Amino acid sequence: MKKLLGIVVLGLLLSGNANAVWIKGTGPFLKFSSHEVLVDYYSEYELDGLCDYWSRSKDWSKFGREKNRKAIKEVLEKQGHDKFICMKLESP
């Protein structure tokens, strides 16, 4: 039974439905979700929340950082902001 459950979980993780397994906002969600799912997630945030995630992502792996920052930049543009505003606000 445990083996079958393991196979099912592994199958979900390897399939496109893996995002349903992870809780929104958790590390695995932010690292492994598709670009579209991340854009939907970040669309719920306003400028200060987006820039907070931008700042926190500097300590993430290159893979996770680049993936999330691309999604954040897309959301910033959709909201009418300069897509580099978070980077500019971080600079002294």
Image (tube, helix red, strand yellow):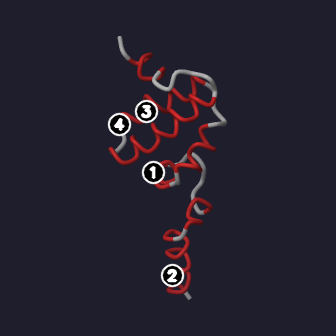
Name above or below for residue 9 compared with residue 36: below
Amino acid identity at mark 3: Arg
Task: Name the residue tied to disc 1.
Answer: 31
Proximity of marks 4 and 1: CB atoms separated by less than 8 Å: no
Q: CA distance from mark 2 to mark 3?
A: 34 Å
Name above or below for residue 23 compared with residue 57: below
Q: Position of residue 51 (x, y in %)?
A: 51, 26
Task: Name the residue tied to disc 2.
Answer: 7
Q: Secondary structure at mark 3?
A: helix
In the rendering, which numbered label is found on residue 59? 4
Q: CA distance from mark 2 to mark 1?
A: 22 Å
Name above or below for residue 58 compared with residue 33: above
> What residue is drawn where x is 63% and y is 32%?
45
Task: Name the residue tied to disc 3.
Answer: 56
Is 57 left or right of 72, judged from the image as shown? Answer: left
Q: CA distance from mark 4 to mark 1?
A: 13 Å
Q: Position of residue 70 (x, y in %)?
A: 46, 39
- Mark closest to the chain's N terminus, 4 or 2: 2
Q: Secondary structure at mark 2?
A: helix
